[in-house]
């Protein structure tokens, strides 16, 4: 059984503020260590549950957030964006995805660093319903025959994910600063939390046959509302239907709809023909930068990551 461990960062144990998720900051270097420990706990759980192979896919921003040299060496690591066979790289032979450190959807009040796919949107809707990344990514993976069977993150993010993926196992993670800056109490919370990640991932893999690929029947109607009209004007180079801050498009399925979302966010019309060499260059640039030129971590009073 081939298990994919997909990793965002906002929902990691040890992280409580946005700067710890922002690439290039000293606080992000601390956040990377937090995320890597979460990922390793889930990798261990996947192997305990019967995985024969584990592939880690880093999905936050440019995709090099884990400390690569600290990732469990039994797992293969994929960082950065790709064009083929998918945005996530070669994942078509995965049997199950375990998604670590998720966050809530754009427009979710009271949540930690909420956004959907990219921080430029105030809301993303699918067939009239506000959606989170687990709706979109889950349905994209679902059309490839791959179910998401596990999620971890703050309460509201997990709640939103389970509305789309009711079969998934889950771990809820606290986002309050005092949870991670309280000495021995914080050590205990982190230790127990990562044991829970491992145990829950193990349970998800053992019950993989009960997990379902998420498939949303087409046709699909997407609405992406930008934070400002200026952002909508800037990013809508494909002349999708636009009314003020809102951009809309139709798709026969999620694979096609997700491609159009990526055109809107990552691939302006002028550079679209060159996207393959550009993503290759970006992957290698950010791999080198995040590995060899990252700043020293600033733990900001955290007991540990």
Image: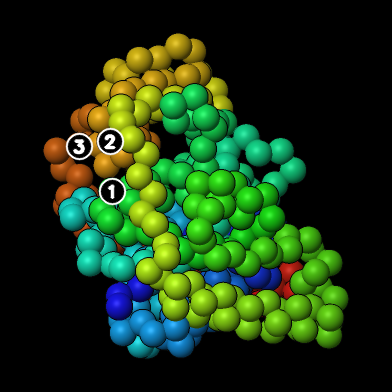
Q: Do the residues labelled 1 and 2 touch (CB within 8 Å)?
A: yes
At 52% across and 30% down in the image, what residue appears? 129
At 21% across and 58% down in the image, what residue appears? 280
Q: Are marks 1 and 3 in contact (CB under 8 Å)?
A: no
Is 166 left, or right, of 3 in this rendering? right
Q: Where is residue 243 in the image (x, y as percent from the top left)?
A: 45, 11
**Quarter where residue 300 is shown:** bottom right
Visible residue check, residue 143: yes
At 41% across and 21% down in the image, what residue appears? 247
Label 1 sits on residue:
143
Q: For the residue carrying disc 2, how many other residues have a C-alpha within 10 Å: few (<14), some (14-19), or many (20+)?
A: some
- The C terminus: image quadrant: bottom right
Disc 2 to disc 3, C-alpha distance: 21 Å
Q: Do the residues labelled 2 and 3 touch (CB within 8 Å)?
A: no
Residue 253: which disc? Answer: 2
Which residue is nearer to you in this view: 232 or 290?
232
Disc 1 to disc 2, C-alpha distance: 8 Å
Q: Nearer the viewer, mark 1 or mark 3?
A: 1
Which residue is nearer to you in this view: 223 or 146?
146
């Amino acid at each position: 059984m081939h298990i994919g461990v997909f990793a965002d960062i906002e929902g990691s144990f040890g992280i409580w503020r946005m700067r710890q998720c922002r690439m290039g900051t000293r606080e992000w270097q601390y956040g990377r260590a937090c995320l890597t420990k979460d990922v390793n706990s889930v990798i261990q759980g996947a192997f305990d549950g019967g995985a024969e192979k584990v592939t880690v896919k880093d999905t936050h921003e440019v995709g090099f957030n884990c400390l690569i040299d600290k990732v469990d060496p039994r797992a293969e690591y994929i960082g950065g964006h790709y064009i083929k066979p998918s945005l996530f790289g070669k994942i078509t032979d995965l049997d199950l995805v375990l998604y670590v450190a998720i966050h809530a959807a754009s427009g979710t009040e009271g949540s930690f660093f909420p956004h959907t796919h990219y921080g430029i949107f105030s809301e993303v809707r699918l067939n009239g319903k506000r959606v989170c990344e687990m709706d979109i990514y889950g349905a994209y993976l679902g059309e490839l025959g791959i179910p998401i069977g596990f999620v971890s993150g703050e309460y509201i993010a997990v709640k939103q994910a389970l509305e789309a993926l009711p079969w998934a196992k889950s771990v809820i993670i606290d986002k309050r600063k005092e949870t991670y800056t309280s000495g021995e109490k914080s050590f205990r919370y982190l230790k127990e939390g990562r044991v829970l990640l491992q145990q829950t991932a193990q349970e998800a893999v053992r019950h993989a046959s009960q997990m379902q690929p998420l498939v949303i029947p087409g046709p699909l109607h997407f609405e992406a509302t930008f934070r400002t009209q200026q952002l909508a004007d800037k990013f809508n180079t494909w002349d999708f239907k636009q009314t003020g801050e809102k951009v809309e498009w139709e798709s026969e399925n999620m694979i096609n709809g997700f491609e159009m979302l990526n055109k809107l966010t990552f691939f302006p019309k002028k550079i679209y023909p060159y996207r393959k060499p550009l993503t290759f260059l970006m992957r290698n640039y950010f791999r080198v930068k995040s590995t060899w030129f990252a700043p020293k971590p600033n733990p900001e009073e955290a007991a540990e990551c």
